[in-house]
Amino acid sequence: MLRIISLNLNGIRSAWNKNVLPWAAAQNADIVCLQELKAQLPDLTAEMMAPDGMRAFYHCAEKKGYSGVGIWSRGEPDRVVEGFDGGEFDAEGRYIRADFGNLSVISLYLPSGSSSPERQEAKFRFLDVFFPQMQALRNEGREIVLCGDWNIAHQAIDLKNWKSNQKNSGFLPEERAWLTRVFDEQGWVDVYRRLHPEATDACYTWWSNRGQAWAKNVGWRIDYQIATAGIAATASRSEVYKAERFSDHAPLIIDYNYK
């Protein structure tokens, strides 16, 4: 079995203080994909660099206290790749890849467009450059799992208040159509949806800090594990873990019968 976890930390130091490491260690995960580190390498403790004996790899943003992604793994990767575009989005620390034999696991953090029109334009630029990147990944012929915070709810069942959010970043028609193309044109699989095609309230992975979103479960499903068909077909169990809170996101855990 292969257990992969994806979690947006909303700050690794903040999540550390909420005991994310003891929880992660207890999950016996093979690979943990992290997003939104909000830290640079000098900010990280020795424990963060070797959490529970795992290997740790980070791609930090150039801007302090912003973005950043990471991968923890039990096994030693054959190769680790930081970034994909050599420009705007690599500077923001949004992509790190680790290869293990014929398997690649990628931790990905898409831009959010909710803070300003300028950031929404940046998000659209990311979608434009990342679509051919995803096709290039498919063309490698490897098994690939892209874990992360995609900042897009794909369908109406993926968020509580879908009617009132149709003009808001994260549920815009253009964003949703882009994800549909990823699935329908390129053949990627939304692994959680494959296992739970009808899930609604149970599927949410992010809750606004405003109002009583968490208490009332007014959430969004924006964290995904999106995979090539071969490994996706081996997925046997998935869980959005909500018993403890490490950030405004919940961990997405998926078990694959993959060796």
Image: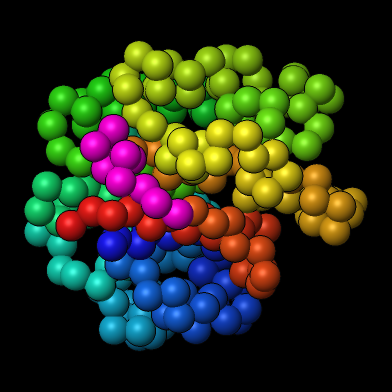
Residue 147: x and y in percent read 40, 47
Magenta span contains residue 77: no
Residue under the point 42% across and 80% down: 25
Residue 38: x and y in percent read 52, 61
Magenta span contains residue 229: yes
Residue located farthest toward the right when viewing the structure as drawn: 211
- Residue 148 versus residue 184 in the image, above or below: below
Question: Residue 111: in sight, yes or no?
Answer: no
Q: Is residue 234 left or right of residue 10?
A: left
Q: Quadrant of the C terminus?
A: bottom left
Residue 137: x and y in percent read 22, 31
- Residue 206 versus residue 29 in the image, above or below: above
Residue in the foreground of this view, choosing between 34 and 146: 146
Question: Residue 66: in sight, yes or no?
Answer: yes
Q: Is residue 180 left or right of residue 170?
A: left
Q: Which residues are magenta?
A: 228-237
Residue in the foreground of this view, choosing between 139 and 258: 258
What colour scheme was applied to this rendering of the protein? rainbow
Q: Is residue 23 left or right of residue 33?
A: right
Q: Quadrant of residue 220?
A: top right
- Residue 202 versus residue 153 in the image, above or below: below
Residue under the point 43% across and 60% down: 5
Residue under the point 65% across and 20% down: 172
Q: Quadrant of the N terminus?
A: bottom left
- Residue 24 versus residue 146 in the image, above or below: below
Image mark count: 0
